[in-house]
Amino acid sequence: MRRRSWPIDLRRCKRQSGNATLEFAIMYAGVILPLTFMLIFVSEMLWIWHSVCDFTRDGARFAATNCWMADGSNVISYMQANVPPMIDQNQFQTGAAAIGVSYFGQDPVSGALLPFTCQSAECSAGCVPDAVSVSITNYQFTRFSGFMKLPPVTIPPFTFSLPMESAGLDSTGAPIASQ
C-alpha cells in the first residue's frame, strides 16, 4: 500500500517556524508604532489649534467689553493670566507667543475701519472705538521636538475681530467700577 502524502510538508513547516513572529515585529516597528505616534501627534496638535482659537476669541470678547487702552495692556494681562490648560501654556505667559490687540474706528466718510486714536483719556465715554481685533502669532507646537527629534511646528496666526460692546462703560458713560 502506498503511503499518502500530506498536503503540508512537515519539513517545510519546521524551516518556517518563527517567521510569523518576525514579520509581526517588523510590521509593528515599521508601520504600526509610527502610525500610532503620528495619530497622537496630530490629535494633540488639533487640540492645541482649537484651544488657541478659543483663547483668541475669549481675548477679543474681553477687549470688546472692557476699557480701551492704547497699548492693549489690559487685554494682554487678562489673556496671560487666563491661558486655558494646554500643552506649551508657558509660551503665552512668557510672551514667546505674541498677543496683539488692535482697535479700529469707522471713518464716517468712507465707512472703512481705520486704526483708532483718541485725544481723550482712556476708558472714557469720549474714547470708544468701533471694533477690536485680537491676534496670536509666533506660537510653536513643540510637544515632540525633544522626544522624536522633530522640528517645532509653527501654528499660523489666529485673529478674531468683534465690534465694541460696552467698552467698560455703563449706560451713563461712566467706567464700570469692577474693571
Image: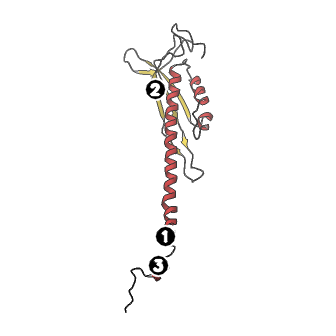
* Residue 82 sits above or below residue 66 on the image: below
- Graded by Cα atoms within 10 Å as few (under 14), some (14 to 19) or many (20 or more), the crowding at tag 3 reads few
Mark 2 crowd level (few <14, some 14–19, many ≥20, 10 Å Cα): many
Q: In this figure, which residue is indicated by the disc labeled 2? A: 161
Instruction: Indicate the position of residue 86 as horizontal and vertical percent values.
Output: 57, 38
Residue shown at the point (57%, 29%) measured from the top left: 79
Circle 3 sits in a helix, a strand or a loop, which is it? helix
Q: How many angstroms separate mark 1 from mark 3 (CA)?
A: 12 Å
Quick check: 145 above or below 98? below
Residue at 52%, 31% (x, y): give it. Answer: 55
Q: Quadrant of residue 94?
A: top right
- Mark 2 or 1: the one toward you: 1
What amino acid is at disc 3? Cys
Q: Which residue is mark 3?
A: 13
Residues at marks 2 and 1 touching, judged by CB atoms closer than 8 Å:
no
Q: Earlier in the sequence, mark 1 or mark 3?
A: 3
Residue type at mark 1: give it: Ala
Separation (CA) of disc 3 from disc 2: 70 Å
Query: What's under tag 2, amino acid-wise?
Result: Ser
**Which residue is under mark 1?**
20
Q: How far across and down, in percent of the image, does residue 77 sit?
A: 60, 26
Residue situated furthest bottom in the rendering: 1
